[in-house]
Image (tube, coloured by chain):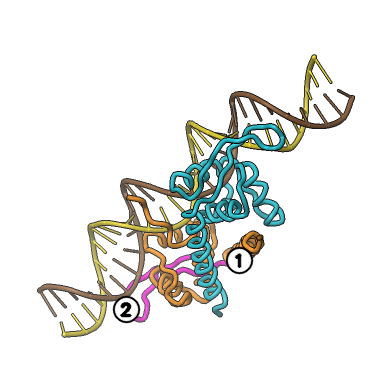
Chain colours: A cyan, B orange, C brown, D yellow
Amino acid sequence: MPKNKADLLQGTLDMLILKSLSLGELHGYGVIQRIRQLSDEMLHVEQGSLYPALYRIEQKGWVSSRWDVHETGREAKFYKLTRAGRKQLETEEASWDRLCLAIAKIRQAT
Amino acid sequence: MPKNKADLLQGTLDMLILKSLSLGELHGYGVIQRIRQLSDEMLHVEQGSLYPALYRIEQKGWVSSRWDVHETGREAKFYKLTRAGRKQLETEEASWDRLCLAIAKIRQAT
DNA sequence: GAGATTGCTTTGACAATCTAGGTATACCGT
DNA sequence: ACGGTATACCTAGATTGTCAAAGCAATCTC
């Protein structure tokens, strides 16, 4: 039984998470929803992908987190982009652009 | 010491190989050169990435191979896109387009 | 005949993602 | 009061694609 392909390409998840958080503080579950919504339902991030990614990203200092209670009265861990995270987002966007350009060049070859 | 990022995003290599071969039969080393050249030196595929990928792709029936001697008089294994491979290339290009579109949507969000 | 280039291959490591589970709280309909 | 659904967090295991680093051999140039 062949395994499925990844929904996302490896390496894009961090960028998407950072971008989501650049629009404002969010908890993990909210990041998933925001990505889904902003992409018009085209991209779905699994929880099992997100939480390890958030942890990884926090370790690198690109986001900070704190526990808080949100309007519904429930506890959640809120993540916020740090200055370094904002810088990292720019870097990743630039390298995404480079890759897209390179692939476009190859694809237009006849 | 943190490891380097991938030069390529995982999942794009197959598409690039298939695309290269869609322009004509090639041996492995030639695929690397073609990708490099078509992308204006922006993308470089390592041999240790390419050959396993070619093997994988051949197992799936997207390319066929044969040993032959090329103009320099040396032996090399030539790969050729199959009909299924051509179909696969279309599929992968379409899903690349979808991903680019989705990410573009997210990035334009304010 | 030494060194560079071309060409194929294998090995081991690694990082990112997915699947699949688990826990717990809040809300809603009945 | 109860069950189901959505929200919210987390972990474990497996898979996979890529890379780094080798090795081997043939050809060409100096």
Q: Which residues are magenta?
A: B64-82
Quarter the C terminus of chain A occupies: bottom right
Q: Secondary structure at mark 2?
A: loop
Whether B54 is among the magenta residues is: no
Q: Give amino acid for label 1.
A: Glu
Residue A109 visible in the current orientation: yes
Residue situated in front as seen by the camera: C27 or B50: C27
Which sits in the foreground, C5 or B69?
Answer: C5
Q: Is residue B80 left or right of residue D5?
A: left
Protein chain holding label 2: B
Pick whichever of labels 1 and 2 is earlier in the sequence. 2
Residue in the image at 56% along x and 73% along y: A104
* Dot 1 and dot 2 within a common chain: yes
Q: Which residue is mark 2?
A: B73
The structure residue drawn at horizontal position 66% and vertical position 50%, both measured from the top left corner, is A34
> Which numbered tag is attached to residue B53?
none
Would residue C5 be found to the left or right of residue A102 on screen?
A: left
Q: Which residue is mark 1?
A: B93
| Picture residue at 43% right of the left edge, 71% below the top | B31
